[in-house]
Image (tube, helix red, strand yellow):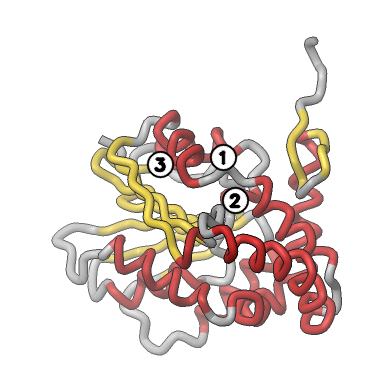
Amino acid sequence: MKGQSMETSFGFRTVPEEEKQGLVNTVFDTVASRYDVMNDAMSGGLHRVWKDAMVAWLAPPRSPARPFRVVDVAGGTGDIAFRIARQIEVNGSITVCDINPEMLGVGAKRDAKRIKPTTPCRFVAANAETMPLPTGSQDVYTIAFGIRNVTRRQQALEEAYRVLKRGGRFMCLEFSNVDIPLMEQIYERYSFEMIPRMGQWIAGDGEPYRYLVESIRMFPNAGRFAAEIERAGFDQVKVRKLTGGIAAIHSGYKL
């Protein structure tokens, strides 16, 4: 029916699409200052290994002959951007896009502490569904642990395709589905019982982390997400599962 509101998931809840972004913003406003600390606590430091694996697979050129432009989406604190920046000695530039000003503030403070960076990073408030970047302007698009928080995921994937150059690469690191039965049971119990408690102890609020756990469970498995990436126009889509499927890296090209 014309004018009827579309619905989407916010964790295990179903909400109107127009409400989800505000709810997600509230979550990240709450967790921004302790986001990196909680990532270490929740994953036992594994998130660092996963991010290193993503950048290693990307293998950014150390000294590209022409300007090499990267956009890192939903990367407000700079974790992925700084890893990529360390690999590029000249001709690199990275734009960090995040819809949440609190997260961008954390990243900008970290950026200011970098010692003589050769690859600059700029921080821009932007929605993954409508980015302020020219069509065909980027060599690489990365997003880590952010795509599941986007309201219209397919639109965000199509936007990633739009901003990439021909031959440009899309890479996404996201939580996935554990495919080892006993490990799945342990992980399920840990996620729903321990992570919200850790959020309460470390960040002073467990509810945002309950949403984050629920959002992981609502996210499609690696195969279905790969199909979504292909529907957005990408070719040569490949998946690498990490730590028994807890996380997965998806890679694709705009050809």
The amino acid type, in three-letter code, at marker 3 is Val
Q: Are marks 1 and 3 in contact (CB under 8 Å)?
A: no
| Residue at image coords 26%, 64% | 60
Q: Secondary structure at mark 3?
A: helix
The amino acid type, in three-letter code, at marker 2 is Ala
In the image, 119: left or right of 75?
left
Instruction: Look at mark 2 in the image and give the residue it sits on.
Output: 126
- Crowding at dot 3, Cα within 10 Å, few <14 / some 14-19 / many 20+, comes out as many
Which image quadrant is residue 187 in? bottom right
| Residue at image coords 76%, 65% | 209
- Crowding at dot 2, Cα within 10 Å, few <14 / some 14-19 / many 20+, comes out as some
| Of residues 103 and 39, the one drawn nearer to the viewer in this rendering | 39
Instruction: Look at mark 1 in the image and give the residue it sits on.
Output: 130
Indicate the position of residue 108 as horizontal and vertical percent values: 57, 74
Instruction: Look at mark 3 in the image and give the residue it sits on.
Output: 163
| Of residues 26 and 53, the one drawn nearer to the viewer in this rendering | 53
Is residue 124 in sight in this rendering? no
User: Dividing the image into 4 quarters, which one contains the N terminus?
Assistant: top right
- Among all residues in the image, which is located at the extreme top? 1
Q: CA distance from mark 2 to mark 1?
A: 7 Å
Q: Secondary structure at mark 1?
A: loop
